[in-house]
Image: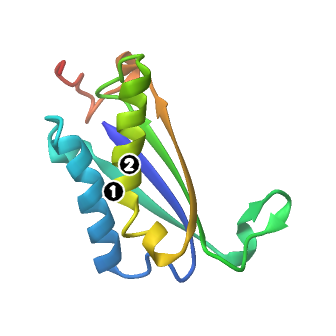
Amino acid sequence: MPFWLVFHPTGTFEDTGSKKALTEDITKIYTGIGLPAFYVVINFIKLSPGDIWVGAERKMDIPFIRIIAEHIAVRLDNEDHVYKYTCDAIENALKPHIADRGYDWEFHVDETERRLWRVNGIVPPPT
């Protein structure tokens, strides 16, 4: 399961349309490699402007979006080109929703041990 947390300030991703557009582009990353769409979970976490700090400074002038993605269903091969391909796919999915709007952003991907994952109490089938 890809699980994404999108931390964003008030004034960004306020409407269902902007959230839907971003989640569709993120979901395409995973359905494109054969995962079912229902594996992709994305939560938007709105923060007030005073709650976003970078380098001990309040980040108020340009919206800052911080994204954490957890990969559980599929782990990446430990190859530089695979990591680059994955980061490029994420950047391409985020670009129209974040970079093209002039926002600052950062993301990282964690890979969680698949044996520590359950869906409704069921061990998901191997990919």
At 42% from the left and 30% from the top, the residue drawn is 83
Q: Amino acid at mark 2?
A: Ile
At 75% from the left and 74% from the top, the residue drawn is 50
Q: Quadrant of residue 116?
A: top left
Q: Position of residue 80 (x, y in %)?
A: 44, 23
Q: Position of residue 120 (x, y in %)?
A: 25, 36
Density class for disc 2 (Cα within 10 Å; few <14, some 14-19, many ≥20) is: some
Q: Are marks 2 and 1 in contact (CB under 8 Å)?
A: yes
The number of numbered discs placed on residues in the rendered structure image is: 2
Q: Quadrant of the N terminus?
A: top left
Q: Quadrant of the C terminus?
A: top left
From the viewer's perspective, is residue 61 above or below residue 8?
below
Task: Report, in whole angstroms, how far the alpha carbon at label 2 lies from the one at label 1.
Answer: 5 Å
From the viewer's perspective, is residue 125 above or below residue 96?
above
Relative side of 87 to 124, left or right: right
Q: Position of residue 33 (x, y in %)?
A: 18, 35
Relative side of 120 to 5, left or right: left
For mark 2, what is the residue?
A: 90
Give SS at disc 1. helix
Viewer-proximal residue among 118 and 81: 81
| Color theme of the render | rainbow
Residue 105: numbered disc: none
Residue 93: numbered disc: 1
From the viewer's perspective, is residue 37 above or below residue 17?
above
